């Protein structure tokens, strides 16, 4: 009895010091030129930070100390100190930066500049521009292979996924995908690269070794026009077993089996669902809904929407602090 | 001489704009006349905006109810702020004898009306885009003609002035339309937003 009491006491104490879901999410609001800070414990907006014009791509630095946000109409990337939640610096991107990717060490950053068909390479320690890579028209999606050797950039108008060797910074392959590719994501084991196509309405599965499309995920939602199904953001669990795909104005997230590539479920979220990020424990997935101006919280295990949080106007990107 | 310079600058700037416009949009092969960055969704599907009870025959019946009709017209007007429209819905449904039927009829009416409003805006945008394309062609050929006139000896100054003026006007109209299109591109989305928000209010009342 006494022992049981002690055990209960200890676990209660443990629970108290490690709250189940105390993470901080940062959401870029494209139209209101702000970043909303969400506490995932209370599921409320705790702060709204004024940033530059047209904030879109947003990501924590690998060390979790800063949040970088691409402010396209100001042609720069702003750096927010995660502790003070204030803008402390800017990074030299090209014109109209939209999305970016960091290498595993968090030392090098690659920025897709939508307006001049280049990818800018930035040294994050020196916060200096160290090079440019010429890519296709309207570069957008950016990701790095898990082994760090390959940078993937998708170009909206050229309809390609460019494979760029990170050592030589040369394009080594171009893979044609469906119309207006928006986002690229690797499985953690590096076995597959997924690329979403907004107008094509598909997600292409690419074999990164052969560098060819080996399969395609298609979506069919009864009662919805095909044009409303616009795949954009992709989120995959670390084990690669489950993927979530944002379908834009279909107002739904498709849940996809990572192995069979079959859609198992559609979750109704807000309007024009765009990008997403997991909490580090993968218990929750937060998705941005650009037209209804909110963020939906999905319970990953239950595959259910459990909460909606109102944010700024036209929420676009989201990043959650890794502990 | 000075005015010729101005034309030349305006015209080269115009071509730069027309060209950059073309590259700045990853065109949808299904809708070549669609001028907006947002991918075109020709009409709103019910499943995008309604997760409430099935509408059944409400789609054909809402027009027969004068009270619903009047309310639909009022709430569809975007000059009425959203919050006010939502308040009116709540008040109307709270006092309705058959709340479930009234709610379904009201949503069916809003769905039809706002969808039609949206379609007409989208058609207008595509019509303007076609006009713009013709305008670019006209400006291009007038520019060539002007260059030819300027190169001729002796130059026909009155004709050069006339064509130059015409080009300035054509350019101005093109630019004005371009600005308007950019602004109007947000309207279909604003209608999506309104319909979704009003639908959500109705659903909450029916729950």
Image (cartoon, rainbow, N blue to C red):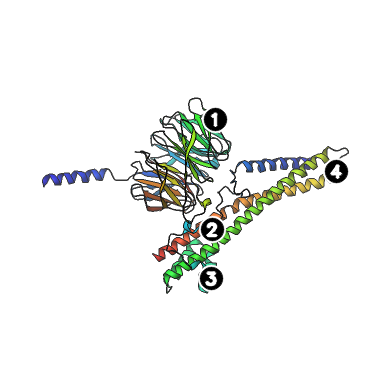
Rendered residue at 51%/52% (across/down): A228
Question: The numbered mark 4 sits on a residue in which chain?
Answer: B
For the question of whether residue A172 can be seen, the reply is: yes
Q: Which residue is mark 3?
A: B63
How many angstroms separate mark 2 from mark 1 (CA)?
41 Å
Badge 2 or badge 3: first in the primary sequence: 3
Of labels 2 and 3, the one closer to you: 3
How many angstroms separate mark 3 from mark 1 (CA)?
60 Å
Badge 4 or badge 3: first in the primary sequence: 3
Q: Which residue is mark 4?
A: B157
How many angstroms separate mark 1 from mark 4 (CA)?
49 Å
**Given contact means CB atoms under 8 Å apart, are the residues at marks 1 and 4 in contact?**
no
**Given contact means CB atoms under 8 Å apart, are the residues at marks 2 and 1 in contact?**
no
Q: Which mark is residue A132?
A: 1
**Given contact means CB atoms under 8 Å apart, are the residues at marks 4 and 3 in contact?**
no
Q: Which residue is mark 2?
A: B191
Of labels 4 and 2, the one closer to you: 2
Badge 4 or badge 2: first in the primary sequence: 4
């Amino acid at each position: 009895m006494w022992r049981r009491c002690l055990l209960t006491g200890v676990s209660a104490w443990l629970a108290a010091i490690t709250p189940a879901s105390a993470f901080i999410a940062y959401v870029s609001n494209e139209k209101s030129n702000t970043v909303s800070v969400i506490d995932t414990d209370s599921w409320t907006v705790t702060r709204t930070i004024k940033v530059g014009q047209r904030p879109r791509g947003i990501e924590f630095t690998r060390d979790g100390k800063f949040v970088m946000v691409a402010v396209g109409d100001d042609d720069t990337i702003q750096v927010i100190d995660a502790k003070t939640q204030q803008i402390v610096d800017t990074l030299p991107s090209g014109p109209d930066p939209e999305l970016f990717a960091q290498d595993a060490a968090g030392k090098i950053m690659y920025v897709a500049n939508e307006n001049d068909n280049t990818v800018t390479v930035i040294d994050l320690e020196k916060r200096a521009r160290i090079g440019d890579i010429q890519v296709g028209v309207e570069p957008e999606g950016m990701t790095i292979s898990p082994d760090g050797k390959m940078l993937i950039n998708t170009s909206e108008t050229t309809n390609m996924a460019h494979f760029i060797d990170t050592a030589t910074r040369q394009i080594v392959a171009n893979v044609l995908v469906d119309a207006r590719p928006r986002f690229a994501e690797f499985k953690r084991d590096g076995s597959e690269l997924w690329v979403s196509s907004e107008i094509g309405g598909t997600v292409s599965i690419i074999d990164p070794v052969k560098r060819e499309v080996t399969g395609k995920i298609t979506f069919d939602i009864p009662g919805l026009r095909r044009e409303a199904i616009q795949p954009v953001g992709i989120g995959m669990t670390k084990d690669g077993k489950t993927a979530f795909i944002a379908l834009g104005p279909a107002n739904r997230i498709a849940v996809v089996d990572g192995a069979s590539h079959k859609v198992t479920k559609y979750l109704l979220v807000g309007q024009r669902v765009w990008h997403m990020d997991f909490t580090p424990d993968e218990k929750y997935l937060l998705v941005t809904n650009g037209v209804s101006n909110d963020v939906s919280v999905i319970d990953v295990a239950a595959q259910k929407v459990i909460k909606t949080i109102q944010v700024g106007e036209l929420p676009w990107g989201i990043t959650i602090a890794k502990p | 001489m000075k005015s010729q310079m101005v034309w030349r600058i305006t015209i080269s700037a115009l071509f730069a704009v027309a060209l950059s416009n073309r590259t700045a949009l990853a065109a949808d092969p299904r809708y070549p006349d669609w001028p907006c960055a947002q991918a075109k969704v020709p009409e709103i599907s019910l499943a995008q905006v309604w997760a409430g009870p099935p509408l059944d025959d409400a789609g054909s019946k809402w027009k027969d109810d004068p009270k619903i009709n009047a309310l639909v017209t009022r709430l569809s007007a975007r000059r009425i702020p959203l919050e006010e429209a939502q308040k009116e819905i709540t008040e109307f449904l709270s006092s309705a004898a058959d709340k479930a039927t009234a709610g379904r009829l009201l949503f069916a009416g809003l769905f039809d009306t706002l969808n039609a409003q949206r379609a007409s805006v989208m058609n207008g945008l595509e019509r303007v885009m076609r006009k713009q394309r013709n305008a670019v062609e006209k400006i291009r050929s007038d520019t060539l003609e002007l260059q030819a006139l300027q190169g001729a000896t002796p130059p026909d100054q009155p004709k050069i002035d006339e064509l130059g003026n015409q080009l300035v006007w054509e350019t101005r109209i093109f630019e004005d339309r371009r600005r308007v299109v950019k602004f109007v591109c947000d309207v279909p989305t604003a209608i999506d937003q309104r319909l979704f928000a009003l639908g959500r209010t109705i659903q909450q009342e029916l729950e």
